[in-house]
Amino acid sequence: MEEVPQVVGGVTAPRLARQWRAGLVVASLGASAPVLVLSASAVTHAVGAVLIALQAVAVWWLVDRLLVSTVVVLVVSAALQLLFPSYGPGIAFVVLCTYAWLRPAAEKLWMFALAVPAVCGPAAVRGRWDLAGLWLGAVLLAWSWGALMRARGQRRAAEQRQAVLEERARIARDLHDVLSHTVSVMVVQAAAADDVFESNPQQARVALRRTEEAGRQALAELRGFLRTVRADSEMGSEAGSGAASEADSLAPDAGPQPMLADVPRLTETMSQAGLAVTLLREGDGEVPPGVQVGAYRIVQEALTNTLRHARASAAEVLLRVDESHVRVRVRDDGRGGAPARGGGHGLVGMRERATLLGGTLYAGPRWDAPGFEVEARLPTREGS
């Protein structure tokens, strides 16, 4: 069983539990202790015993003191081979493999240069070039195996980092989509209520009711978003549960993801907020649910940007479905090309959605009239 991992040289390394450390020490002693019976004198026997004990200590601290332990094991291996010609490198190959696994190339080349003479040198000194060649091949094999393990570990770490970044971007995009539209409607309605609060109380009450409806919709969407995040991450943190519980108590059950059939309700909400929206629907065909959600979110974000930034009085939404694509176009009569329209997370999120669905998105000033235009083409069939 392993303890909490640590990072060595950019690669996650295990902190070996005591039983595994003990197993490595036993393996080290088992590979080295038999040479003591070959000692010709008491002095050689004593020196050999000290070297074997020192090697066992280095193996125990191998992961925690990698550099020192590796050097100690190599030196002890060379000394034992010189003292006992019939003795081989022993545990040195395991240590070399571990070092190559945990250290980057820039830090370990000199260790490889030390390992070759330490492992192969004693055999070469005795003129046993066959053994020296065998040990050299074993050094190369152990080193290559460790480097391969390191490369795999780095690749897994990079994939995990990329997955985390993609998940963060997805959460930020979805959270923006969930709250941006309804909160913008709430702000506009609250401002409208404030403007006519004294002169037209009835109209102010209507605006306040719409603000309440938008707030409840925001809570319902936030609840659904929190459920999705918890399901995706498989984590039930107390903070997330508390936030979800608050939304649960204030909002009804969140419904399914919005589809193209919900776009008319969206345009009606925007019209009530003061932006006259015309909806044009052309064509018919089967559209996958994921594409429908993406198209709805693009329309929602484009209209929200128009309401917040464009100073527009009217907008037009076109939904055209053919055999292979869904075309989404949102035009307004506001300030085309204003800097605020191109910043923030809105346009970035729309482009990411279109790209993930295999489509394209254009956002910029209209060419035929003043105003801004967002147009997306989303494939409904793979490869189209």
Image (cartoon, grey):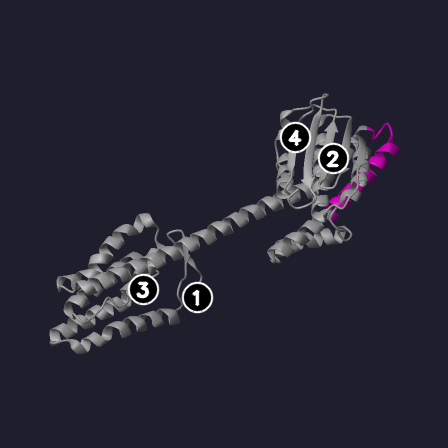
**Label of residue 94 in the image:** 3
Q: Position of residue 69 (x, y in %)?
A: 28, 61
Q: Position of residue 240 (x, y in %)?
A: 64, 53
Q: Which image quadrant: the N terminus?
A: bottom left
Element type at marker 3? helix
**Label of residue 363 in the image:** 4
Residue 204 lies within the magenta run: yes
Q: Earlier in the sequence, mark 1 or mark 3?
A: 1
CB of mark 2 within 8 Å of CB of mark 3? no
User: Dot 1 surroundings within 10 Å: few (below 14), some, or many (20 or more)?
Assistant: few
Q: Tag 1: residue type?
A: Glu
Q: Is residue 275 above or below residue 357?
A: above
Q: Gap between marks 3 and 4, in whole Å?
A: 59 Å
Query: On the rendered structure, is 314 left or right of 19?
Result: right
Q: Position of residue 228 (x, y in %)?
A: 66, 53
Q: What type of secondary structure mainly makes up the magenta span?
A: helix
Query: On the rendered structure, is 25 left or right of 125?
Result: right
Which residue position holds label 2?
187
Q: Tag 3: residue type?
A: Val
Which residue position holds label 1?
2
Q: Position of residue 83 (x, y in %)?
A: 15, 69
Of marks 1 and 4, the one in the foreground:
4
